[in-house]
Image (spheres, grey):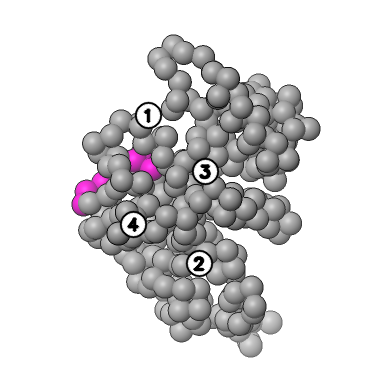
Amino acid sequence: MTTPAVHCRVLRVALGGKNVVDGIDLDVSPGDWVAVVGPNGAGKTTLMHALAGLIVSTGELTVSGRSPRDSGRKAMSQVVALMPQRPVVPEGATVTELVALGRTPYLRRFGTETATDRAVINNVIERLDLTAFADRRATELSGGELQRVVLARALAQEPKVLLLDEPTSALDIGHQQQVLDLVEAMRLSDNITVIAAMHDLTLAGQYGQRIVLLDQGRVVADGTPSEVLRADLLGKVYGARVEVLDRPSGPVVVPILQKNAR
């Protein structure tokens, strides 16, 4: 039997005395892409941080067979990488230097990059078409370019599980597709498991093989895009009027204008 890439049983995270993640059960197979969706405050980002071992949680949790509670931060960072919603970019850091931070989990204490580390960094920069920007300061890049660099940093960790927290929230539609296409290519070529908290339901349905819908920290639906992205269910959870169109690439969620709104 294949070991799940991610395993959760009754996973809870309490913040400010409230369960922001409240009893989540989740198993994700290696190489799958799972999109996590839900309204603001549903617990998506908190779940991503719990899976990365960045915040305290209770219940069962293993990522690539390792428990964030029993393994050190360095050991976990060798199997799971988080692409944050709002990345912190060190002032003055070049693209190469920012990507190189992804190799930190593999460096010995007070150690320097090895030939293997440099090869991984150069390979990721090349695969994400960042060679022309390698010596530029990361703070000088456009939003789409910076997102590719932050993704490169995460991939430089050579993770088995890649966590994306709203990876396209600040991007236009072209750059959204570019970043998600890159993730999909890497998933297929390197058998990376992708779990992505996504705001855009249409993108979630097109890229995710499976969708987990959260509301108030709990899973209210878990299945294929067509099973979860239903107008009645989305209307109930989001309090929104939507129509779901069936397209070859996946469901398309369209908001419906109220007739007397004009």
Marks 1 and 2, how far apart in space?
30 Å
First in sequence, mark 3 or 4: give its number. 4
Q: Residue at x 55, y 52 (%)?
A: 187
Picture layout, residue 258 above or below residue 101 = below
> In terms of secondary structure, where does tag 1 sit?
helix
> In terms of secondary structure, where does tag 3 sit?
strand
What is the three-letter code of the residue carrying label 3? Met
Disc 3 vs disc 1: which is toward the camera?
A: 1
Marks 2 and 4, how far apart in space?
18 Å
Left-right relation of 171 to 46: right
Verify whether residue 58 appears in magenta.
yes
First in sequence, mark 3 or 2: give its number. 3
Give the percent coordinates (x, y) of residue 108: 42, 17
Marks 3 and 4, how far apart in space?
26 Å
What is the three-letter code of the residue carrying label 1? Lys
Residue 74 got which mark? 1
First in sequence, mark 3 or 1: give its number. 1
First in sequence, mark 4 or 1: give its number. 4
Label 3, residues with CA under 10 Å away: few <14, some 14-19, many ≥20: many
Left-right relation of 12 to 257: left
Q: Which residue is mark 4?
A: 2
> In terms of secondary structure, where does tag 2 sit?
loop
Disc 2 vs disc 4: which is toward the camera?
A: 4
First in sequence, mark 1 or 2: give its number. 1
Left-right relation of 84 to 218: right
| Furthest residue toward top | 110
- The part of the chain drawn in magenta is 52-59
Question: Marks 4 and 1: CB-CB under 8 Å?
Answer: no
Residue 88 got which mark? none
Q: Which residue is mark 3?
A: 83
Instruction: Name the image quarter holding the N terminus.
Output: bottom left
What is the three-letter code of the residue carrying label 4? Thr
